[in-house]
Image (cartoon, rainbow, N blue to C red):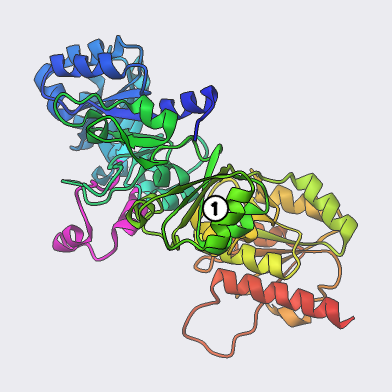
Amino acid sequence: MEFTKTQLESARSRLIFACDVQTLAEAVEAGERLKDSVGLWKIGLELFLREGRPVVERMAAFGKPIFLDLKLHDIPATVHRAIRNLEGLPIRFLTVHASGGVEMLREAQSAAQQLQSRPTLLGVTVLTSLGAEDLARDGYPGTVGELVVSRLQACLEAGIGGVVASALEVGSLAARAPAGFSLVIPGIRPSSGAQDQKRVATPAAAIADGATHLVVGRPIRGGRGRRHRAGDRLRHGVSMNGRGRPDRPALLKPPAEDVHLVFGIHPVEELLETGRVQALLVTSSAPPRLVGAARARGIRVENVFASELDQMTGQGVHQGVVALADGFTYADLDELLAEAVASGPALLVFLDRITDPHNLGAIARSAYLLGAHGLVIPMRESAHPTAGAMKASAGALAHLPVVRVNNLKMAMAAAKDAGVLVVGASGEADDDLPGCDLRGPVALVIGSEHQGLRPSVAAACDLVVRIPMCADGVGSYNASVAAALCLYETLRQRQAE
């Protein structure tokens, strides 16, 4: 699959080359080879301590921004002074350990903003060399994902501009991070040779889940004497083996806005009907009917190993099929409202803080099957139509309009102005769902299963109802189940007329 010049440049700007070499001379040699193929240089602690400021200045001379990966971690005042000592260096990104606490992060942010270069500070959440067993050994009772999210919250509270995290957590972080927040992902590998990093993934999987930048070192550097070119990976979407020949497809693709990863037999079949599929990667177990349908539409089909799709999808249940499709296209709120009201009675679903892509996909599936006109999701604190969401929706997201808005409450107000009754679902409401008249134009608002609707969102609803429960002790319904029950009750009432 060939990419346009704009797509290639956009992808290249996201690629950070890890200059994990021993000397300034080796770094300069890498710079000469890769200056037209990557977006930034990462200079780590080892090289910086050996060569000092000259290595930063020399690599910056290639015209690429510098990511200074020092992972600072000390008492707040010491970190502040250490960062001030970097004055005069042309730095774009600078790392500190998020485990240092909010006060240390605030001091680091204050110091970074006083530098002439005003670098974006990145909080290192959990080192990719650590796994669940390492955390358990240190007495941490939770999962790696929970710790990463906790440290993201500390970084947001301190006001810093991004985090460094494993590709396995990037989807969860992207759903919680504000617009413009940097998600820098190391541990990127074209294959399973992870070596000293445990939580790794392929470029395609990381970008599909929301990574803004990828850190790649060994796969580009390769062995001694090999000229592994990052540009070749970007241009052709393949990995180059030690002999310079392609050995696996689609390992680095353009940004998620340009190419969307969809896997699983049924989701891909549904997607084929939309005309958005650019290429299909299949194993020997892929259904012949699906492969034939793709080829009949003139879609390029490539045969790959199952292990390659495992890597690409982050061990997702791909069923031997992965589609590379045009990026997800969001609908316009005004157009969706007009169409829903005109085809009436309108039925919309607004989602508040639904951050799990699988819940988003399950809700989309129920909404599509039960006659909803579309979904409305917020830009922030929300899952987006990723590959996992598409898989969970069984292809419904390929057909159901989805609107993404900056302010959910303003979107709810627009629905009210269009004559739509806005009904929130909350376990704390006094009125039961079956007693609510849902026969007219309705927008259902579903909140997080753990936190429910935000108070301000609940207050913006015309009314709030509860779904009856016959037993206590388990909290509430799963968000996707709550949405399905509300949608079904709406359909039941309308069909009873």
Q: Is residue 268 above or below residue 75?
A: below
**Left or right position of 322 against 74:** right
Mark 1, Cα crowd under 10 Å, few <14 / some 14-19 / many 20+, is many
Residue at image x 39%, y 53%?
Answer: 309
**Left or right position of 153 against 263:** left
Give the labeled residue for mark 1: 382
**Residue 26 percent location from the top left of the image:** 15, 18
Q: Amino acid at mark 1?
A: Ser
Q: Is residue 369 above or below residue 226?
A: below
**Left or right position of 270 against 204:** right
- In the rendered image, the quadrant that contains the C terminus is bottom right
Residue 223 versus residue 43: which sits nearer the camera? 223
Magenta-drawn segment: 124-151
Residue at image x 18%, y 29%?
Answer: 20
Residue at image x 37%, y 27%?
Answer: 232
Q: Does residue 124 appear in the picture of this structure? A: yes
Q: Does residue 354 appear in the picture of this structure? A: no
**Left or right position of 209 against 27:** right
